[in-house]
Image (tube, grey):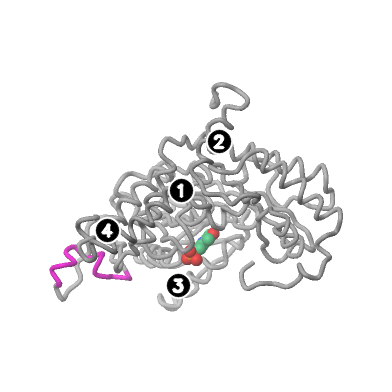
Amino acid sequence: MLIEGGEGALSDIFEKTREEFLLPDGIIYLDGNSLGAMPKKALARLQEAASEEWGKMLIRGWNDANWIDLPDRTGNKIARLIGAEQGTVMVGDTTSINLFKALTAALGLADRKVILSDSGNFPNDLYVAQGVVKLFGADAELRIVAPEEVDAAISDEVGVLMITDVDYRTGRRHNMQALDQKAKALGIVTIWDLCHSAGALPVNLSACNADFAVGCSYKYLNGGPGAPAFIYVRPGLADRIGPALSGWMGHEAPFAFDLDYRPASGVSRMRVGTPPVLALSALDAALDVWNGVDLNLLRARSIELCEIFIEEVERRCPDLQLASPRDAEQRGSQVSFHFAEGYAAMQALIADGVIGDFRAPDIMRFGFAPLYVSKEDAREAARRLASVILQKRYADPIFATRSKVT
Ligand SMILES: *Cc1c(COP(=O)(O)O)cnc(C)c1O
């Protein structure tokens, strides 16, 4: 049995991790799947990195504060959370850019130039793939099937499988291990986007034998707005890649200033340019919140919170239709409901102190970050959502105006 000590044991564990975060009074925060809350350690570190390191060390910080190793150091901390070996994860750039690096590397390795993905993917990933396909010319093709058809579409025509593990709208999960295994048996290079998985549920890249993985650090990993993303390359594979973005920080000897590019060994060759030191410093500290956190217990907590929310919402608001899989095993750490007036209803709910978000066309989305969301948050959020819906508070015209970011 996972949870010793029975009922309440999970709450005891996650009350402690909640204390690691700065959460504004009176707010129930259910959007950690879009931007994680701020760890107290990250704020302290950010202040120190700015005033003590940048301010006082100036250029010496690269060596004296070891800024130069931040991409590997943060990568190694993330590695534990995604079941990767030490030295296989590098942090820097954005998820989109890391996906570009992975896709170009994968097409370079694959004999066949068909990339298979699905229509449940975050559109951004498909945009990046469309750009890459153009670069690779007439042979290259992006093939998009429905999420439930991915398994059947894995064939010997495909060269690269590019899949996002957890659907950003509904939280539906793919069976990563099974898909990866089927693809590998056909010689297909695999790329996983873990944006909604890393820090949300246990991932085991080594067991899946995945070739590449990418993901954000500003969602469940709480690295802060625009925090740099990660890229994983399977051990042994990195040395066969000729990076498309062959920058000096991925050079074997950046400070030799040779005129020719020679890639560094291993995942270090996926580095490109100068790392964002302040952002990486905040992330480095934010990742320490995970020390001692058992990811199986995290998963148990996530399921507990999501189940409470679904039950409480459905009992009160029969008009809301669950958009997420009902089976917890098939779901990430979020719950979504369809509601035609979803945008306005979410604005009304935010005005009432419960922050979730909206995804077109009609999805109200609620993320449950187990490190800092409590059972009482889940219950109270359901009560307030019900009051917005049942009293039709979303009909107030002040909630109809759409902002740039939804
Ligand atoms: C959040 C998210 C991204 C974000 O990419 P950025 O380059 O950081 O903007 C990419 N892919 C998926 C699946 C995401 O959920």
- The residue pinned by badge 3 equals 140
Q: Vertical placement of 121 versus 372: above or below?
A: below
Say which residue label 2 marks.
Answer: 15
Q: Residue type at mark 3: give it.
A: Ala
Q: Amino acid at mark 1?
A: Lys
Asked whether 400 falls inside the magenta stretch, the response is: no
| Residue at mark 4 | 67
Structural distance between the alpha carbons of marks 4 and 2 = 33 Å
Mark nearer the N terminus (4 vs 2): 2
Q: Nearer the viewer, residue 335 or 403?
A: 403
> In the rendered image, which residue does mark 1 sit on?
40
Characterize the local packing of mark 3: few (<14), some (14-19) or many (20 or more) Cα atoms within 10 angstroms.
some
Report the residue at 57% width, 27% height from top.
9
Is residue 221 found left or right of 315 in the rendered image?
A: left
Q: Residue furthest top?
A: 5
What SS does tag 4 mark?
helix
For the record, the magenta segment spans 244-257
Q: Quadrant of residue 100?
A: bottom left
Q: Earlier in the sequence, mark 3 or mark 1?
A: 1
Distance of mark 1 from mark 4, alpha carbons? Answer: 21 Å
